[in-house]
């Protein structure tokens, strides 16, 4: 909570900035932060994020991630790109 209040006090307010939240329903629960956000994009948690790719992309996305198995690309990288894509589509 202290981190969120500091963010609002020292970044959002002085810069008159907008705040956006993008997270799955699994991680929801920071009421203070949600009240401060102009944009709130909450999505249903995927059991497997490959579902997102199957639904939203065509082509060789699976081959691309499989090439990076030993680098973490398929685990955390896959999630990272989902969030970037969601922000792009929503904003």
Image (spheres, rainbow, N blue to C red):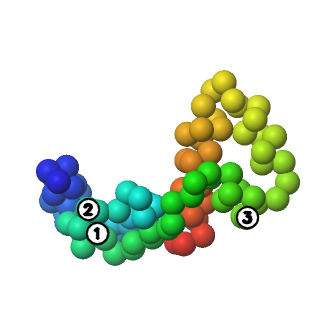
Determine the secondary structure under disc 3: helix
Disc with the residue nearer the chain's start (2 vs 3): 2
Q: Return the residue at label 3.
A: 55
From this viewpoint, is residue 12 visible? no
Which residue is drawn at the image coordinates 35% and 62% (left, top)? 28
C-alpha distance separating marks 1 and 3: 28 Å
User: 35 or 9: which is nearer to us?
Assistant: 35
Instruction: Depth check: give the residue in front, 15 or 25.
Output: 25
In the image: residue 28, left or right of residue 65? left
Q: Nearer the viewer, residue 44 or 39?
A: 44
Q: Which residue is mark 1?
A: 34
Closer to us: mark 1 or mark 2? 2
Q: Position of residue 51 (x, y in %)?
A: 68, 57
Res 76 visible: yes
Circles 1 and 2: CB atoms closer than 8 Å: yes
The residue beneath circle 2 is 30
Image coordinates for residue 11, horizontal then vertical, percent:
23, 57
Is 17 on the left or on the right of 69, as rendered? Answer: left
């Amino acid at each position: 909570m202290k981190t969120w209040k500091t963010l609002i006090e020292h970044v959002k307010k002085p810069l008159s900035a907008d705040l956006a939240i993008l997270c799955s329903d699994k991680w929801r629960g920071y009421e203070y932060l949600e009240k401060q956000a102009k944009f709130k994009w909450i999505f249903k948690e995927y059991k497997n994020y490959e579902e997102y790719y199957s639904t939203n992309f065509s082509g060789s996305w699976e081959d691309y991630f499989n090439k990076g198995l030993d680098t973490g690309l398929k685990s955390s990288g896959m999630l990272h790109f989902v969030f970037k894509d969601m922000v792009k589509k929503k904003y």
